[in-house]
Amino acid sequence: MTNQSSYIVLGVAAAAVAAVFVWNQSGEAVNAQGSASPYPVDLAAGEALYAQSCAVCHGANLEGAENWRTPGDDGSLPAPPHNADGHTWHHPDSLLFTYTKLGGKETMAAQGMEFNSGMPGFGEQLSDEEIWNILAFIKSTWPERERTVQADRTAQDIASKGE
């Protein structure tokens, strides 16, 4: 390989890496961690934040509340598990992020649905980056099949919005 060819290959590789970095940073693609986060994910921070902010309802081991499929007296469902037994992995990142930031009731109202959700919004307590780290931590615990399905749904969601 000539010096000129080497420079061309290095230039193309550098441009590709830069393009992927910009694409990931803009939140317009699913990154290598299977996340649409516009931030680099920090799993250790996400795990600590989950323990602080989420485990009280969703369980220290992401197991959810007991009888999570049975509505309480107020009609709201108890906190679901965030492990592979629950339905969190059925939803794209955009919904998981919004549900965490705004809460269940407000998120569903924005979609034209009235829903009595016990999930409060954490937008006042957690930054967007912290929410993305929590979601990345949760997703890191799923088996490969669930991570793949959820990443595909996230990619389809992004594509459907033309982002």
Image (spheres, rainbow, N blue to C red):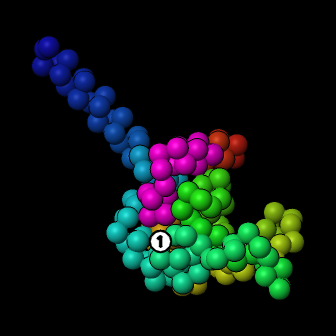
At 41% across and 71% down in the image, what residue appears? 47
Question: In the rendered image of this protein, does residue 99 appear above or below residue 13?
Answer: below
Tell me the SS state at disc 1: loop
Which residue, as the protein is rendered here, is positioned at the far front?
A: 67
Residue 34: % across, % down: 48, 49
Crowd around label 1: few <14 · some 14–19 · many ≥20 (10 Å): few
Which residue, as the protein is rendered here, is positioned at the far top?
A: 1
Residue of label 1? 61
Left or right: 114 in relation to 10: right
Viewer-proximal residue among 116 and 162:
116
Q: Main secondary structure of the magenta part?
A: helix
Q: Is residue 62 visible?
A: yes
Residue type, label 1? Asn
Question: Residue 162 is drawn in which quadrant?
Answer: top right
Residue 93: % across, % down: 59, 56
At 55% across and 48% down in the image, what residue appears? 146
Residue 147 belongs to magenta span: yes
Viewer-proximal residue among 77 and 97:
77
Span of residues in magenta:
136-153
Question: In the rendered image of this protein, does residue 49 appear above or below residue 163?
Answer: below
Q: Is residue 94 visible?
A: no
